[in-house]
Amino acid sequence: MWSDNGRTMVGLKNEFAQFLERCSSDIIEYANQQKIKFKFIVPYASHFGGLWERGVQSCKYHLRRVVGNAHLTYEEFSTVLAQVEAVLNSRPLSPMSSDPNDFLPLSPAHFLVGRTLTAPAYDNLVETPTHRLDRYQRVEQIRQHFWRRWSKEYISELQTRTKWRLNTQDLKPNTMVIIKEDNFQPLKWHLGRVIRNIPGKDGISRVAEIQTASGLVRRAYAKICPLVDPDEDSLGSQELQGRGHVAAS
């Protein structure tokens, strides 16, 4: 497990080691059996963090812009941060299974709470003038602004890391994909599985037919982002490590 080399992280590692030594020999034995080690990147070299540091940068960038000069109380700002945290932890990572009828992806939330994060539906407040909103609606508007900005950037980042961007082959049937949509509620990802590719006159496929929970849809490749199956992406993982990105071991 890799971590930043910040003082709080190093202190936590030392405190956690003392806790394990005092209270939980079973956990120590399990960690040794699984060969789990805790490692730190080089001090003052955040670029060694690779993918996770890119995620931190993206979150800070959009958070500054959606909060802006808003005058929030402590409770309101805590609510915004909790909602932003939920948005980040809802992001799809990879398919949960190869079942063509399973549209549930693995997300960070599964490691935290064991299930997908959900949120109640709310009116779209993105275009509503701020002076017409009460305090909670203002917080909700900030969340919706953050979701709209960050989710688009996250999907674009995924598209640049998938192997099919080189046009070496069509999307494989049953591949789980994220479909770009502009009007989805926060924490709601439009997911589906590829049924077939639709080639053009030149024989190159630029459109795919996708099975979603609500039916069949057709989308251009520019509007879909494949979730790479970790079992089939050993080459891609090596490529990321070669660029300085960090992979968990």
Image (cartoon, helix red, strand yellow):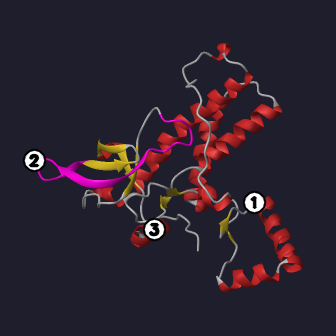
Is 119 magenta? The answer is no
The residues bearing labels 2 and 1 have C-alpha atoms spaced at a distance of 56 Å
Q: Which residue is mark 1?
A: 6
Q: Which residue is mark 2?
A: 201
Which residue appears at 82% of the width and 70% of the height? 16
Which quadrant holds the N terminus?
bottom right
Classify 10 Å Cα crowding around label 1: few (below 14), some (14-19), many (20 and above): some
Along the viewing direction, whichever of 37 and 186 lies nearer the viewer:
186
Q: Which element is circle 2 on?
A: loop
Disc with the residue nearer the chain's start (2 vs 3): 2
- Return the mark for residue 35: none
Asked whether the beta carbons under mark 1 and mark 3 sit within 8 Å of each other, the answer is no
Q: Which element is circle 1 on?
A: loop
The residues bearing labels 1 and 3 have C-alpha atoms spaced at a distance of 29 Å
In the rendered view, tell whether residue 31 sits above or below residue 165: below
Q: Kindly tell me whether residue 110 is visible in this rendering.
A: yes
Which residue appears at 81% of the width and 34% of the height? 75
Q: Position of residue 60 (x, y in %)?
A: 64, 42
Q: Position of residue 110 (x, y in %)?
A: 61, 59
Q: Position of residue 108 (x, y in %)?
A: 60, 57
Q: Position of residue 116 (x, y in %)?
A: 59, 53
Image quadrant where residue 65 sits: top right
Q: Amino acid at mark 3?
A: Pro
Q: Nearer the viewer, mark 1 or mark 3?
A: 3
Span highlighted in magenta in the image: 184-207
